[in-house]
Amino acid sequence: MNSGDTRQQLRAKRRSLSTVEQHSASQHLVSSLRRETFFMRAKRVALYLANDGEIDPGQLLETALKSGKQCFLPVLHPMKKNSLCFIEYSPKTQLVANKFGILEPVFNTAQIAPAWSLDIIFMPLVGFDRQGNRMGMGGGYYDRTLAFMSVQKKLKPKLVGLAHSCQEVDLISQQSWDIPLHLIATDREIICAKPK
């Protein structure tokens, strides 16, 4: 089976979860992550607004804001093709739909945080394996944005993929440009990636 077929199947699987299942999964995810030392110590955190059946980190965003963390959301970069930038978010931030229909903060150069300046980036995904390989939507946005990590072998930001446990696959073939995850957090467990 090719990656396009796998991607479609995994997207269908997460979209098929009921509202109750989605809400429960989100609550389990947040209750385990908020107790993690790496989250408690972090000062600058990037999250995302859930779309297309993605596990929803909205409660984690609220927790982070209440505990005084600076929070950022990904925005399609208007000057760098197929790349993201991270814009600071607060409950007063004006959101607009991007070309994919996903809400994001209005682009504002004064509020951009370079990816390297963040402590954690919580990332959505379509599929994952226990080696830290992530299958995204296929556009390569996060890989391009985080390419500096493969060149400089940086440990920061900590890259945490968020997923429903049903999105796990045995192995995702890795490309040279793929940036692996440090951790995967699901509604059932937190997996420390073990690259082969």
Image (spheres, rainbow, N blue to C red):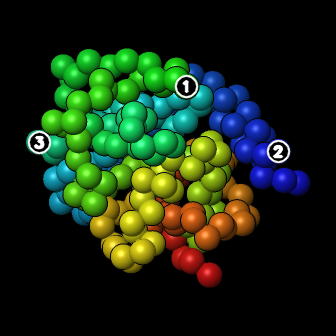
At x 63%, y 53%, the residue is 135
The answer to whether residue 60 is left or right of residue 180 is: left
Rounded to the nearest angstrom, the CA distance separating label 3 from label 1 is: 31 Å
Counting residues from the N terminus, which is met first, the one under dot 2 or under dot 1?
2
Mark 3–mark 1 CB contact (< 8 Å): no
Q: CA distance from mark 2 to mark 3?
A: 42 Å
Q: Residue furthest left?
A: 68
Q: Amino acid at mark 3?
A: Gly
Q: Position of residue 69 (x, y in %)?
A: 16, 45
Instruction: Give, as a three-letter code, the residue at label 2.
Output: Asp
Mark 3 or mark 1, which has the lower sequence index?
3
Check disc 1: other Cα within 10 Å, few if <14, some if 14-19, many if 20+: few
Pick whichever of labels 2 and 3 is earlier in the sequence.
2
> In x, y percent, where is residue 187?
51, 47
Single out the residue that lies furthest toward the bottom. 196
Q: Secondary structure at mark 2?
A: helix
In this rendering, which labeled residue sits more in front, label 2 or label 3?
2
Left or right: 155, with 17 as reference point: left
